[in-house]
Amino acid sequence: MSQLSDTHITELRSLDDVPNAPDRNKPIGFILRLAKALHTYGLPAYELEQTMNGCAVAMGYGIQCMSLPTSISMTILPPDADSRTYLIRVSPGEVNLERLRKTTEVARRVIQGDIYSAEGADCLKEIAEASPDYSNWIIIFAFGLVSACIARIFSGGVNEMAVSAIIGFIVGMMAIASQSRPLLDHLLPAVCAFIATLLTLSMNRLVGIEVTTSVVVISGLIILLPGLSLTIALAELATQNLVSGTARLTGTATVFIQLAFGSALAVESAKRLGLEINQRVLAPVESWTIWLAAAVAAVALVPLFAARRKDVGWFLLASLSAFTAVHFATVAMGPSLGAFVGAITVGLIAKIVTRFYDIPGAMIIMPGFIILVPGTVGYRSILALVEKDIITGLATAFDVVVIGISLVAGFLLSSLVHLPKDGAKDHY
């Protein structure tokens, strides 16, 4: 077995820097780099394995691939040599839709024979070395804008939106800072939850602003809530990627626990300081402002997912379609079936867009599922358990599982729909 692994600091660097790694100009070298790139840019296990199988077969190689959140194992069977097994140590990737789009395009061109593997490997290197499309201040601003919009979607008033935006800015700055500080990166959910909760509880005494604590804290931390990871984990389990799904599910639970611990620690600290949790009754808000907030949040997700500016329309389509489907289906059938209908809607739109507009399905699925995922419910569940409210915590946890299963079932059901192939290109 050839092991291509490294330390935490260097595990995201190019395989060119790893001693004795296969030459990037050779087919095996390209296959390894393609798998690493797809994983780094956030492709789920079942899609990554499908892509690698298609690419290897097109190049005349056999392959057995297993993708996990922290590693990729591949046994490559060349046509004229003995098989070799490679293990690549990676970190769970952050979603980067533009780089993912370019990488899947490289894979498609190699599969279709438009370019050779050596050219594909050079393209992958160019993609990896390209400068970020958005500066740090845009990313930080997007954090705050999304948090303010989510507060409005949760019926928060001007106070809740303002404080949520401040917390979002702080979380964004810490997320940027954590990229070069491994220790902060590991503890980011707990630290952000502590700061968000303590700051929220301090607002009344510091500046005389009364806010609803739960709405502000959840809205401020919304980007860190691993609801999307939870849904991907359930989808991997449903598609029989059991090891990857279990590992991702465990990682998701760890993030939830860190968030709950940070909030619980802040609540205890606030009690020592004489601060109180404020759960004032929120006044009804006009429905058009909620729809506007959903649209603005969709636009703000573009830099957070590192998509192109011209993809704003697709983000709006995905988010508003999901929001509309969930809103009306929930009123008619309840939250679980509402999530089911929303997932079917997003899945069908993703298939249509992929088939007829040559756009990767992730461009629709990622922003659409952000609206659908049960991250906020999961956070409330863990926090209730930490506060020893066992009944509420377990009941809410059950809701999380039901909603998550509904999402996966809806997504898988939409994938069974077959569309005509005229003028279309398959995306791997």
Image (cartoon, rainbow, N blue to C red):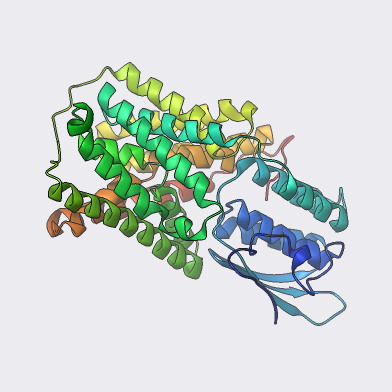
Whether residue 56 appears in this view of the structure is no
Quarter of the N terminus within the rendering = bottom right
Residue 121 rendering spot, x and y as whole percentages: 81, 56
Which residue does the image show at 82% across and 53% down from the upper left?
A: 120
Identify the residue shown where x is 23% and y is 33%: 203
Q: Relative to residue 65, is residue 409 drawn left or right?
A: left
Q: Is residue 207 above or below residue 194?
A: above
Q: Within the image, what quadrant is residue 163 found in?
A: top left
Q: Where residue 54 sits: x, y (%)?
A: 72, 59
Residue 112 coordinates in the image, percent (x, y): 82, 50
- Say left or right for 103 vs 69: right
Is residue 215 shown above or below 115? above
The front one of 155 and 350 is 155
Q: Position of residue 240 (x, y in %)?
A: 49, 66
Q: Is residue 377 left or right of residue 83?
A: left
* Residue nearest the observer in this picture, 374 or 426: 374
- Horizontal arrangement in the rendering, residue 295 relative to residue 415 (left or right): left
How many numbered marks have been drawn onto this rendered protein structure?
A: 0
